[in-house]
Amino acid sequence: MKLMSETAPDTARAGPGANLPELTVSELAQAVKRTMETNFDRVRVRGELGRVLIAKSGHLYVDLKDEDATISTVMWRSNVQGLTFKPEEGLEVVAEGRLSTFPGRSQYQLIAERMAPAGVGALLAQLEKLKQRLAGEGLFAAERKKPIPYLPRVIGVVTSPTGAVIRDILHRLGERFPRRVLLWPVLVQGPEAAGQVARAIEGFNKLQGALRPDVLIVARGGGSIEDLWAFNEEIVVRAAAASAIPLISAVGHETDTTLIDFAADLRAPTPTGAAEKAVPVRADLIQRVTTLDGRLRNGLVRGLEKRRTELRAAAARLPRLETLFQIPQQRFDRASERLNAALVSNTRAAQSKLDRIAARLRPEALSQDITRRREHLARTAARLAPAMQRALITHRKHLDASARILESLSHKSVLARGFVMVHREDGTLVRSAKELNPGDVLDLTFADDRRKAIVEGGAEPAKSRPKPKSGAAQGDLF
Protein backbone atom coordinates (compact mmCIF):
# COMPACT_ATOMS: atom_id res chain seq x y z
CA MET A 1 0.00 0.00 0.00
CA LYS A 2 2.74 2.36 0.82
CA LEU A 3 4.34 1.78 -2.57
CA MET A 4 1.14 2.60 -4.41
CA SER A 5 0.58 5.71 -2.42
CA GLU A 6 4.04 6.95 -3.27
CA THR A 7 3.68 6.40 -7.06
CA ALA A 8 0.18 7.76 -7.45
CA PRO A 9 1.15 11.41 -7.58
CA ASP A 10 3.73 10.77 -10.41
CA THR A 11 1.07 9.16 -12.60
CA ALA A 12 -1.25 12.05 -12.03
CA ARG A 13 1.44 14.53 -13.00
CA ALA A 14 2.32 12.69 -16.28
CA GLY A 15 -1.20 13.09 -17.68
CA PRO A 16 -2.37 11.64 -21.05
CA GLY A 17 0.31 10.07 -23.31
CA ALA A 18 2.56 9.18 -20.46
CA ASN A 19 3.33 5.93 -22.26
CA LEU A 20 4.87 7.72 -25.40
CA PRO A 21 8.58 7.11 -25.87
CA GLU A 22 10.92 9.98 -25.17
CA LEU A 23 12.83 11.32 -28.23
CA THR A 24 15.84 13.56 -28.43
CA VAL A 25 15.68 16.69 -30.57
CA SER A 26 17.89 15.09 -33.20
CA GLU A 27 15.74 11.96 -33.30
CA LEU A 28 12.62 14.00 -33.74
CA ALA A 29 14.23 16.08 -36.51
CA GLN A 30 15.36 12.97 -38.38
CA ALA A 31 11.91 11.45 -38.03
CA VAL A 32 10.33 14.56 -39.51
CA LYS A 33 12.91 14.52 -42.33
CA ARG A 34 12.10 10.87 -43.20
CA THR A 35 8.39 11.51 -43.11
CA MET A 36 8.63 14.56 -45.38
CA GLU A 37 10.98 12.94 -47.88
CA THR A 38 8.72 9.86 -48.01
CA ASN A 39 5.46 11.74 -48.54
CA PHE A 40 6.92 14.45 -50.83
CA ASP A 41 9.62 12.50 -52.66
CA ARG A 42 8.78 14.20 -56.00
CA VAL A 43 7.13 17.60 -56.39
CA ARG A 44 6.94 20.41 -58.97
CA VAL A 45 6.62 23.90 -57.59
CA ARG A 46 5.97 27.11 -59.49
CA GLY A 47 6.96 30.40 -58.00
CA GLU A 48 9.02 33.57 -58.24
CA LEU A 49 12.72 33.65 -57.38
CA GLY A 50 13.49 35.81 -54.38
CA ARG A 51 16.93 35.77 -52.84
CA VAL A 52 19.43 34.19 -55.30
CA LEU A 53 22.89 33.06 -54.12
CA ILE A 54 25.45 30.90 -55.87
CA ALA A 55 28.00 29.76 -53.29
CA LYS A 56 31.72 29.39 -53.99
CA SER A 57 31.12 25.63 -53.97
CA GLY A 58 28.81 26.04 -56.97
CA HIS A 59 25.59 25.23 -55.13
CA LEU A 60 22.54 27.45 -55.74
CA TYR A 61 20.46 28.80 -52.83
CA VAL A 62 17.22 30.63 -53.68
CA ASP A 63 13.90 31.56 -52.11
CA LEU A 64 10.92 30.32 -54.11
CA LYS A 65 7.85 32.38 -53.23
CA ASP A 66 4.36 33.46 -54.17
CA GLU A 67 2.00 36.00 -52.61
CA ASP A 68 1.43 34.04 -49.38
CA ALA A 69 4.41 31.78 -48.73
CA THR A 70 8.17 31.28 -49.23
CA ILE A 71 10.17 28.07 -49.38
CA SER A 72 13.93 27.80 -49.26
CA THR A 73 15.31 25.93 -52.25
CA VAL A 74 18.71 24.33 -52.80
CA MET A 75 20.18 23.03 -56.07
CA TRP A 76 23.47 21.17 -55.95
CA ARG A 77 26.36 22.10 -58.23
CA SER A 78 25.97 19.08 -60.55
CA ASN A 79 22.42 20.22 -61.37
CA VAL A 80 23.32 23.93 -61.54
CA GLN A 81 25.73 23.21 -64.38
CA GLY A 82 22.82 21.88 -66.46
CA LEU A 83 20.70 25.05 -66.19
CA THR A 84 19.85 26.60 -69.54
CA PHE A 85 19.23 30.06 -68.08
CA LYS A 86 20.70 32.39 -65.48
CA PRO A 87 18.63 32.48 -62.26
CA GLU A 88 17.76 36.06 -61.40
CA GLU A 89 15.57 37.62 -58.73
CA GLY A 90 11.98 38.19 -59.92
CA LEU A 91 12.08 35.42 -62.56
CA GLU A 92 9.14 33.01 -62.44
CA VAL A 93 10.33 29.39 -62.64
CA VAL A 94 9.11 25.81 -62.24
CA ALA A 95 11.33 23.76 -59.91
CA GLU A 96 11.20 19.97 -59.73
CA GLY A 97 12.69 17.95 -56.88
CA ARG A 98 11.91 16.60 -53.43
CA LEU A 99 11.11 18.12 -50.06
CA SER A 100 13.50 17.68 -47.19
CA THR A 101 14.43 19.37 -43.94
CA PHE A 102 17.52 21.03 -42.65
CA PRO A 103 17.75 19.66 -39.05
CA GLY A 104 20.26 22.29 -37.97
CA ARG A 105 17.57 24.99 -38.27
CA SER A 106 14.40 22.89 -37.98
CA GLN A 107 13.09 24.12 -41.35
CA TYR A 108 12.01 22.35 -44.47
CA GLN A 109 13.39 23.09 -47.93
CA LEU A 110 13.08 22.03 -51.54
CA ILE A 111 16.00 20.10 -53.02
CA ALA A 112 15.63 21.09 -56.69
CA GLU A 113 17.00 18.81 -59.38
CA ARG A 114 15.60 20.72 -62.36
CA MET A 115 14.56 24.29 -62.88
CA ALA A 116 13.23 26.12 -65.93
CA PRO A 117 11.55 29.45 -66.62
CA ALA A 118 7.80 29.22 -66.23
CA GLY A 119 6.06 29.34 -69.61
CA VAL A 120 7.04 30.49 -73.06
CA GLY A 121 6.73 34.15 -72.10
CA ALA A 122 9.53 33.88 -69.58
CA LEU A 123 11.75 32.10 -72.08
CA LEU A 124 11.11 34.74 -74.71
CA ALA A 125 11.85 37.53 -72.25
CA GLN A 126 15.10 35.86 -71.28
CA LEU A 127 15.91 35.28 -74.94
CA GLU A 128 15.31 38.94 -75.84
CA LYS A 129 17.49 40.11 -72.99
CA LEU A 130 20.38 37.88 -74.08
CA LYS A 131 19.91 38.93 -77.71
CA GLN A 132 20.19 42.62 -76.85
CA ARG A 133 23.32 42.04 -74.79
CA LEU A 134 25.08 40.04 -77.49
CA ALA A 135 24.00 42.51 -80.18
CA GLY A 136 25.49 45.29 -78.08
CA GLU A 137 28.82 43.46 -78.20
CA GLY A 138 28.68 43.43 -82.01
CA LEU A 139 28.32 39.66 -82.42
CA PHE A 140 25.46 40.11 -84.90
CA ALA A 141 27.03 42.95 -86.95
CA ALA A 142 26.74 42.56 -90.72
CA GLU A 143 30.36 43.54 -91.34
CA ARG A 144 31.47 40.46 -89.40
CA LYS A 145 29.73 38.10 -91.84
CA LYS A 146 32.02 36.02 -94.06
CA PRO A 147 31.08 35.03 -97.62
CA ILE A 148 30.13 31.40 -98.24
CA PRO A 149 32.55 29.72 -100.71
CA TYR A 150 30.97 29.03 -104.09
CA LEU A 151 32.06 25.39 -104.33
CA PRO A 152 33.45 24.08 -101.01
CA ARG A 153 35.75 21.09 -101.10
CA VAL A 154 34.79 19.76 -97.63
CA ILE A 155 31.56 20.51 -95.72
CA GLY A 156 31.40 20.08 -91.94
CA VAL A 157 27.98 19.27 -90.43
CA VAL A 158 27.14 19.66 -86.73
CA THR A 159 23.95 17.74 -85.92
CA SER A 160 22.57 14.52 -84.49
CA PRO A 161 23.83 11.41 -86.30
CA THR A 162 20.50 9.56 -85.85
CA GLY A 163 17.96 12.13 -87.00
CA ALA A 164 16.52 12.79 -90.43
CA VAL A 165 18.48 16.05 -90.69
CA ILE A 166 21.79 14.50 -91.73
CA ARG A 167 20.03 12.22 -94.23
CA ASP A 168 18.23 15.20 -95.80
CA ILE A 169 21.50 17.15 -96.07
CA LEU A 170 23.39 14.24 -97.64
CA HIS A 171 20.52 13.52 -100.04
CA ARG A 172 20.29 17.12 -101.22
CA LEU A 173 24.07 17.42 -101.59
CA GLY A 174 24.10 14.24 -103.64
CA GLU A 175 21.41 15.66 -105.92
CA ARG A 176 23.02 19.05 -106.40
CA PHE A 177 26.79 18.56 -106.22
CA PRO A 178 28.35 15.65 -104.27
CA ARG A 179 30.95 16.90 -101.83
CA ARG A 180 32.96 15.39 -99.01
CA VAL A 181 30.97 15.69 -95.75
CA LEU A 182 32.39 15.43 -92.22
CA LEU A 183 29.81 14.84 -89.48
CA TRP A 184 30.46 15.91 -85.90
CA PRO A 185 27.76 14.08 -83.92
CA VAL A 186 26.17 16.08 -81.09
CA LEU A 187 23.03 16.18 -79.01
CA VAL A 188 20.61 18.79 -80.34
CA GLN A 189 18.32 18.90 -77.32
CA GLY A 190 18.77 18.77 -73.56
CA PRO A 191 21.10 20.32 -71.00
CA GLU A 192 24.29 18.93 -72.62
CA ALA A 193 23.41 19.93 -76.18
CA ALA A 194 24.73 23.52 -76.06
CA GLY A 195 28.17 22.50 -74.80
CA GLN A 196 28.50 19.77 -77.42
CA VAL A 197 27.48 22.07 -80.28
CA ALA A 198 29.93 24.77 -79.17
CA ARG A 199 32.77 22.24 -78.87
CA ALA A 200 31.96 20.83 -82.29
CA ILE A 201 32.25 24.28 -83.92
CA GLU A 202 35.54 24.92 -82.12
CA GLY A 203 36.80 21.44 -83.03
CA PHE A 204 36.14 21.94 -86.75
CA ASN A 205 38.04 25.24 -86.62
CA LYS A 206 41.07 23.49 -85.09
CA LEU A 207 41.32 20.95 -87.91
CA GLN A 208 44.16 21.44 -90.39
CA GLY A 209 45.07 20.08 -93.80
CA ALA A 210 42.70 18.14 -96.04
CA LEU A 211 40.20 17.53 -93.23
CA ARG A 212 39.53 21.23 -92.55
CA PRO A 213 36.06 22.13 -93.86
CA ASP A 214 35.50 25.08 -96.15
CA VAL A 215 32.02 25.69 -94.72
CA LEU A 216 30.08 24.55 -91.63
CA ILE A 217 26.38 23.68 -91.32
CA VAL A 218 24.80 23.65 -87.85
CA ALA A 219 21.43 21.94 -88.28
CA ARG A 220 18.45 20.65 -86.33
CA GLY A 221 14.84 19.78 -87.14
CA GLY A 222 11.85 21.73 -85.92
CA GLY A 223 10.46 21.78 -82.40
CA SER A 224 9.16 23.94 -79.60
CA ILE A 225 11.12 26.82 -78.14
CA GLU A 226 12.19 24.53 -75.31
CA ASP A 227 13.43 21.93 -77.82
CA LEU A 228 15.45 24.54 -79.73
CA TRP A 229 16.74 26.30 -76.62
CA ALA A 230 20.26 24.85 -76.88
CA PHE A 231 20.83 27.02 -79.98
CA ASN A 232 19.92 30.14 -77.98
CA GLU A 233 22.63 29.46 -75.40
CA GLU A 234 25.35 32.10 -75.13
CA ILE A 235 28.14 29.53 -75.48
CA VAL A 236 26.77 28.39 -78.86
CA VAL A 237 26.24 31.93 -80.13
CA ARG A 238 29.78 32.97 -79.20
CA ALA A 239 31.27 29.85 -80.80
CA ALA A 240 29.39 30.56 -84.05
CA ALA A 241 30.48 34.22 -84.08
CA ALA A 242 34.12 33.28 -83.41
CA SER A 243 34.27 30.62 -86.15
CA ALA A 244 36.92 31.36 -88.76
CA ILE A 245 35.14 28.95 -91.13
CA PRO A 246 31.99 30.39 -92.75
CA LEU A 247 28.96 28.99 -90.94
CA ILE A 248 25.39 28.32 -92.12
CA SER A 249 22.70 27.92 -89.45
CA ALA A 250 19.73 25.67 -90.22
CA VAL A 251 17.85 25.22 -86.94
CA GLY A 252 14.14 24.39 -86.98
CA HIS A 253 11.69 25.27 -89.68
CA GLU A 254 11.47 28.48 -91.70
CA THR A 255 9.41 30.22 -89.01
CA ASP A 256 11.76 29.25 -86.16
CA THR A 257 14.42 31.76 -85.15
CA THR A 258 17.28 31.17 -82.70
CA LEU A 259 20.19 33.35 -81.67
CA ILE A 260 22.67 31.28 -83.66
CA ASP A 261 20.85 32.51 -86.80
CA PHE A 262 21.98 36.06 -86.00
CA ALA A 263 25.61 35.07 -85.30
CA ALA A 264 25.94 32.78 -88.33
CA ASP A 265 27.30 34.05 -91.64
CA LEU A 266 24.18 32.79 -93.44
CA ARG A 267 20.80 31.51 -92.24
CA ALA A 268 18.96 28.75 -94.07
CA PRO A 269 15.24 28.16 -93.49
CA THR A 270 15.71 24.38 -93.16
CA PRO A 271 18.58 21.86 -93.13
CA THR A 272 17.72 21.01 -96.72
CA GLY A 273 17.92 24.70 -97.58
CA ALA A 274 21.36 24.83 -95.96
CA ALA A 275 22.59 22.13 -98.33
CA GLU A 276 21.18 24.10 -101.26
CA LYS A 277 22.99 27.27 -100.13
CA ALA A 278 26.26 25.39 -99.56
CA VAL A 279 26.73 24.07 -103.13
CA PRO A 280 25.45 24.98 -106.59
CA VAL A 281 23.57 22.53 -108.85
CA ARG A 282 26.11 20.43 -110.72
CA ALA A 283 23.81 19.90 -113.70
CA ASP A 284 23.21 23.64 -113.98
CA LEU A 285 26.96 24.27 -113.88
CA ILE A 286 27.56 21.69 -116.57
CA GLN A 287 24.80 23.21 -118.71
CA ARG A 288 26.17 26.70 -118.16
CA VAL A 289 29.72 25.63 -118.99
CA THR A 290 28.49 23.82 -122.09
CA THR A 291 26.55 26.90 -123.18
CA LEU A 292 29.53 29.16 -122.60
CA ASP A 293 31.79 26.72 -124.46
CA GLY A 294 29.45 26.77 -127.45
CA ARG A 295 29.26 30.54 -127.40
CA LEU A 296 33.04 30.73 -127.20
CA ARG A 297 33.51 28.39 -130.15
CA ASN A 298 30.94 30.27 -132.24
CA GLY A 299 32.54 33.56 -131.34
CA LEU A 300 35.99 32.29 -132.34
CA VAL A 301 34.67 30.98 -135.67
CA ARG A 302 32.86 34.24 -136.44
CA GLY A 303 35.94 36.22 -135.45
CA LEU A 304 38.18 34.17 -137.74
CA GLU A 305 35.77 34.51 -140.64
CA LYS A 306 35.58 38.25 -140.11
CA ARG A 307 39.37 38.58 -140.02
CA ARG A 308 39.69 36.39 -143.13
CA THR A 309 37.19 38.57 -145.01
CA GLU A 310 38.98 41.75 -143.94
CA LEU A 311 42.33 40.28 -144.98
CA ARG A 312 41.02 39.37 -148.42
CA ALA A 313 39.55 42.84 -148.89
CA ALA A 314 42.84 44.45 -147.88
CA ALA A 315 44.78 42.14 -150.18
CA ALA A 316 42.54 43.10 -153.09
CA ARG A 317 43.42 46.75 -152.59
CA LEU A 318 47.19 46.10 -152.60
CA PRO A 319 49.17 46.50 -155.90
CA ARG A 320 50.34 43.37 -157.77
CA LEU A 321 53.71 41.90 -156.82
CA GLU A 322 55.15 42.40 -160.32
CA THR A 323 54.22 46.08 -160.22
CA LEU A 324 55.98 46.60 -156.90
CA PHE A 325 59.28 45.17 -158.25
CA GLN A 326 59.36 46.78 -161.70
CA ILE A 327 61.16 50.01 -160.81
CA PRO A 328 63.65 48.38 -158.41
CA GLN A 329 64.38 45.77 -161.11
CA GLN A 330 65.18 48.49 -163.62
CA ARG A 331 67.48 50.22 -161.16
CA PHE A 332 69.22 46.94 -160.52
CA ASP A 333 69.75 46.27 -164.23
CA ARG A 334 71.25 49.74 -164.80
CA ALA A 335 73.52 49.39 -161.80
CA SER A 336 74.68 46.01 -163.07
CA GLU A 337 75.62 47.53 -166.44
CA ARG A 338 77.65 50.32 -164.82
CA LEU A 339 79.33 48.00 -162.39
CA ASN A 340 81.68 46.26 -164.86
CA ALA A 341 82.92 49.55 -166.35
CA ALA A 342 83.39 51.05 -162.92
CA LEU A 343 85.36 48.02 -161.72
CA VAL A 344 87.71 48.24 -164.75
CA SER A 345 88.21 52.01 -164.32
CA ASN A 346 88.86 51.65 -160.59
CA THR A 347 91.37 48.85 -161.18
CA ARG A 348 93.30 50.96 -163.71
CA ALA A 349 93.45 53.97 -161.35
CA ALA A 350 94.71 51.79 -158.51
CA GLN A 351 97.37 50.22 -160.77
CA SER A 352 98.62 53.66 -161.86
CA LYS A 353 98.88 54.81 -158.23
CA LEU A 354 100.75 51.65 -157.33
CA ASP A 355 103.21 52.15 -160.17
CA ARG A 356 104.00 55.68 -158.98
CA ILE A 357 104.59 54.55 -155.42
CA ALA A 358 106.68 51.56 -156.54
CA ALA A 359 108.95 53.85 -158.54
CA ARG A 360 109.83 55.73 -155.34
CA LEU A 361 110.49 52.51 -153.44
CA ARG A 362 113.60 51.44 -155.50
CA PRO A 363 116.72 50.41 -153.42
CA GLU A 364 118.98 52.98 -155.05
CA ALA A 365 116.63 55.86 -154.10
CA LEU A 366 116.27 54.56 -150.52
CA SER A 367 120.07 54.27 -150.16
CA GLN A 368 120.61 57.80 -151.35
CA ASP A 369 118.00 59.15 -148.95
CA ILE A 370 119.60 57.30 -146.00
CA THR A 371 123.04 58.71 -146.92
CA ARG A 372 121.70 62.27 -147.04
CA ARG A 373 120.00 61.94 -143.67
CA ARG A 374 123.13 60.39 -142.04
CA GLU A 375 125.31 63.32 -143.29
CA HIS A 376 122.78 65.80 -141.92
CA LEU A 377 122.85 64.03 -138.55
CA ALA A 378 126.68 64.13 -138.41
CA ARG A 379 126.72 67.87 -139.08
CA THR A 380 124.10 68.48 -136.44
CA ALA A 381 126.03 66.40 -133.85
CA ALA A 382 129.26 68.32 -134.59
CA ARG A 383 127.51 71.61 -133.82
CA LEU A 384 125.79 70.27 -130.70
CA ALA A 385 128.85 69.90 -128.38
CA PRO A 386 130.21 73.50 -128.77
CA ALA A 387 126.68 74.87 -128.38
CA MET A 388 126.17 72.98 -125.13
CA GLN A 389 129.56 74.18 -123.81
CA ARG A 390 128.74 77.78 -124.56
CA ALA A 391 125.32 77.42 -122.86
CA LEU A 392 126.92 75.94 -119.71
CA ILE A 393 129.44 78.79 -119.48
CA THR A 394 126.70 81.38 -119.82
CA HIS A 395 124.53 79.74 -117.11
CA ARG A 396 127.51 79.39 -114.75
CA LYS A 397 128.25 83.11 -115.04
CA HIS A 398 124.62 83.91 -114.20
CA LEU A 399 124.76 81.57 -111.19
CA ASP A 400 127.95 83.10 -109.81
CA ALA A 401 126.54 86.59 -110.10
CA SER A 402 123.37 85.55 -108.27
CA ALA A 403 125.43 83.90 -105.51
CA ARG A 404 127.46 87.10 -104.96
CA ILE A 405 124.28 89.13 -104.73
CA LEU A 406 122.75 86.64 -102.29
CA GLU A 407 125.85 86.66 -100.08
CA SER A 408 125.90 90.44 -99.98
CA LEU A 409 122.27 90.50 -98.90
CA SER A 410 122.59 87.66 -96.32
CA HIS A 411 122.42 88.47 -92.56
CA LYS A 412 125.56 86.42 -92.03
CA SER A 413 127.64 89.13 -93.61
CA VAL A 414 126.08 91.59 -91.19
CA LEU A 415 126.91 89.31 -88.25
CA ALA A 416 130.47 89.00 -89.51
CA ARG A 417 130.84 92.76 -89.09
CA GLY A 418 130.16 92.43 -85.35
CA PHE A 419 126.37 92.55 -85.11
CA VAL A 420 124.28 90.12 -83.03
CA MET A 421 120.81 88.72 -83.81
CA VAL A 422 118.54 88.54 -80.73
CA HIS A 423 115.66 86.05 -80.44
CA ARG A 424 113.39 85.07 -77.62
CA GLU A 425 113.09 81.45 -76.56
CA ASP A 426 110.01 81.01 -78.74
CA GLY A 427 112.03 82.09 -81.81
CA THR A 428 110.57 85.59 -82.28
CA LEU A 429 113.00 88.33 -83.30
CA VAL A 430 113.66 91.19 -80.85
CA ARG A 431 113.72 94.52 -82.63
CA SER A 432 113.65 96.95 -79.68
CA ALA A 433 114.80 96.99 -76.05
CA LYS A 434 111.36 98.14 -75.04
CA GLU A 435 110.06 94.70 -75.95
CA LEU A 436 112.18 93.08 -73.20
CA ASN A 437 111.48 92.62 -69.54
CA PRO A 438 113.88 91.74 -66.73
CA GLY A 439 114.41 88.00 -66.51
CA ASP A 440 113.62 87.25 -70.18
CA VAL A 441 115.82 84.53 -71.65
CA LEU A 442 117.30 85.45 -74.99
CA ASP A 443 118.99 83.51 -77.75
CA LEU A 444 121.97 85.43 -79.24
CA THR A 445 123.21 84.51 -82.69
CA PHE A 446 126.83 85.53 -83.55
CA ALA A 447 128.63 85.02 -86.81
CA ASP A 448 130.37 81.88 -85.52
CA ASP A 449 128.12 80.56 -82.68
CA ARG A 450 125.01 80.99 -80.49
CA ARG A 451 124.71 81.89 -76.77
CA LYS A 452 121.99 82.27 -74.14
CA ALA A 453 121.49 85.48 -72.12
CA ILE A 454 119.16 86.83 -69.41
CA VAL A 455 117.92 90.41 -69.30
CA GLU A 456 118.90 92.19 -66.05
CA GLY A 457 116.67 94.69 -64.27
CA GLY A 458 117.32 98.48 -63.87
CA ALA A 459 119.26 100.86 -66.09
CA GLU A 460 122.65 102.47 -65.32
CA PRO A 461 123.18 106.21 -65.68
CA ALA A 462 124.28 107.17 -69.10
CA LYS A 463 127.64 108.64 -67.84
CA SER A 464 128.63 105.47 -66.03
CA ARG A 465 128.08 103.25 -69.02
CA PRO A 466 131.19 102.46 -71.05
CA LYS A 467 131.33 103.86 -74.49
CA PRO A 468 130.44 101.40 -77.12
CA LYS A 469 133.26 100.16 -79.21
CA SER A 470 133.50 100.97 -82.80
CA GLY A 471 131.18 98.67 -84.80
CA ALA A 472 129.05 97.60 -81.81
CA ALA A 473 125.28 97.79 -82.04
CA GLN A 474 123.83 100.75 -80.27
CA GLY A 475 121.00 98.62 -78.90
CA ASP A 476 123.25 96.21 -76.93
CA LEU A 477 121.78 95.36 -73.52
CA PHE A 478 124.75 93.61 -71.96
Image: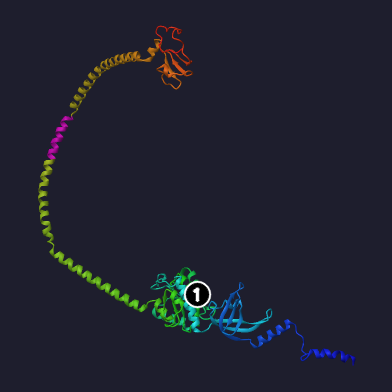
Residue at image position (42%, 19%) is 435
Q: Residue furthest bottom?
A: 1
Residue 314 lies, in percent from the top left, at: 15, 64
Return the residue nearer the eye: 126 or 259.
Answer: 126
Which part of the image, by quadrant, shows the N terminus?
Answer: bottom right
Residue 221 lies, in percent from the top left, at: 46, 83
Main SS, magenta residues:
helix
Q: Which residue is mark 1?
A: 234
Question: Does 421 appear above or below 262?
Answer: above
SS at badge 1? helix
Residue 75 lies, in percent from the top left, at: 60, 79
Numbered circles on residues, count = 1
- Horizontally, residue 462 falls left or right of residue 1, namely left
- Horizontally, residue 270 falls left or right of residue 57, namely left
Question: Does 210 appear above or below 251?
Answer: above
Question: Does 199 appear above or below 38?
Answer: above
**Based on the displayed image, in which of its 4 quarters is residue 347 positioned?**
top left
Q: Which residues are magenta?
A: 347-361
Return the residue nearer the eye: 328 or 346.
Answer: 328
For label 1, the crowd category at 10 Å Cα-Cα, with few meaning under 14, some 14 to 19 and many 20 or more, is: many
**Based on the displayed image, in which of its 4 quarters is residue 461 positioned?**
top left
Q: Is residue 332 magenta?
A: no
Q: Is residue 348 magenta?
A: yes
Question: Does 191 appear above or below 407?
Answer: below
Residue at image position (27%, 74%) is 295
Return the residue nearer the eye: 332 or 262.
Answer: 262
Amino acid type shown at disc 1? Glu
Residue 377 lies, in percent from the top left, at: 23, 21
- Horizontally, residue 291 falls left or right of residue 154, namely left
Q: Residue furthest right?
A: 2
Residue at image position (68%, 79%) is 105
